[in-house]
Image (cartoon, rainbow, N blue to C red):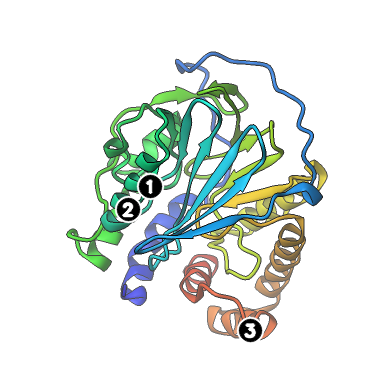
Amino acid sequence: MMNYSRFRKASLAVLVSLAAFGFQTSADVSAAAVVMPEQNTVTAAQVPSPVVKNLKIGSVAVYDFGKIKIHAYQSKDPLGDETYVLENDKHLVLLESTAFKANNEEWQQYIKSLKKPVAGALMAYHPNDADEYGAKIYATETALKSWQKGGSIYALTENFNKGFGTEAVAGTLPTQAKLLQEGQHVKIGGILFHILPAGDAAYSIELPQINVVYRHMMGSHTHNILTSPAHIDAEIAAMQQYQKAGYALVLTGHNVPEGQDAVATKLTYLQTIKQLAAENKNKEDFVTAVKKSFPDYQGDNYLMMTADSLYAK
């Protein structure tokens, strides 16, 4: 198990680098062909019940939307990594990887068991050992830069190596990718993706055909890493937009898929965090107040990282 105290201190520099919140785009990228969006027909009430399969380390929950299936791998690693395979009648598309070699090896075996070609791999916040999946990697220019030396994902991976040991961590990051533009609609393997700006190191992804969105963190009962008041405001705005969009399901990198009830819960959490940060003058009082307001929340390490960032001297 990771020494979270050491990890939290090492990660503060990364959080500070993320605090300069603002959507980043590049006008000069070569990307897959732009396509027009397709209207979704799936509502939150129509989300299929998942079929769960236990693996040796983690488990997979399969959501069958008909033309598209979502295979959600719950790694059960110390970081709670969650990664995905999207499947249609002909192809597979991968979404994210995990931080640990054993999990990635197990996930690769599961992907092979589906017996369909992998059309591509969308990597954002969790690109660790992505080259080993043998698929073309897609990412925004901002994400790709974050994987390189001096970038935030690169720094986090270095911290993982220190906290868990290089023998356990999937520490190799891709050095190149097929570049996508934020705001772009692109089809990979016949599945439509809408690339959304996320305002930090990478990007979010909308699946218009099934009214689903992927983002890095949410979790209805998990603390978020929040790097600044502007970051909190941006997350509040994102939850309000998710409510307006009426997404049937929200996929995240550190939690099982959840629906609109979780969006409402997270919105209340973020609004409360904003209020508590304004009311408390030091991080000790802030942490105490947050734990009192959310006694059953997981991810105390994330809360401490938020406190370190919000109250950095």
Q: Between 159 and 84, which is closer to the camera in this rendering?
A: 84
Three-letter code, disc 1? Tyr
Could you tell which of marks 1 and 3 lies nearer the N-terminus?
1
Marks 1/3: CA–CA distance: 36 Å
Question: Is 299 left, or right, of 267 in this rendering?
Answer: left
Count residues near mark 3 (Cα–Cα under 10 Å), then give few for <14, some for 14-19, many for 20+: few
- Label 3 element class: loop
| Foreground disc of the pair 2, 3 | 2
**Other-residue count near label 2 (Cα within 10 Å), few / some / many at <14 / 14–19 / ≥20:** some
Label placed on residue 110? 1
Crowdedness near tag 1: few (<14), some (14–19) or many (≥20) residues, C-alpha within 10 Å: some
Q: Residue at x 60, y 76 (%)?
A: 297
Mark number displayed over residue 295: 3
Instruction: Classify residue 233 by image quadrant.
Output: bottom right
Mark count: 3
| Residue 56 place in picture, x, y as percent | 34, 63
On screen, 17 above or below 22? below
x and y, in percent, of residue 93 in the image: 47, 33
- Marks 2 and 3, how far apart at CA: 34 Å
Q: How far is mark 1 from mark 2, CA to CA?
A: 6 Å
Secondary element under disc 2, as helix, strand or loop, is helix
Residue at 39%, 60% (x, y): give it.
55
Marks 1 and 2: CB-CB under 8 Å?
Answer: yes
Disc 2 marks a residue whose amino acid type is Glu
In percent of width and height, residue 50 lies at: 62, 55
Q: Is residue 276 visible?
A: yes
Which dot marks residue 106?
Answer: 2
Which of the image's four quarters has the N terminus? bottom left
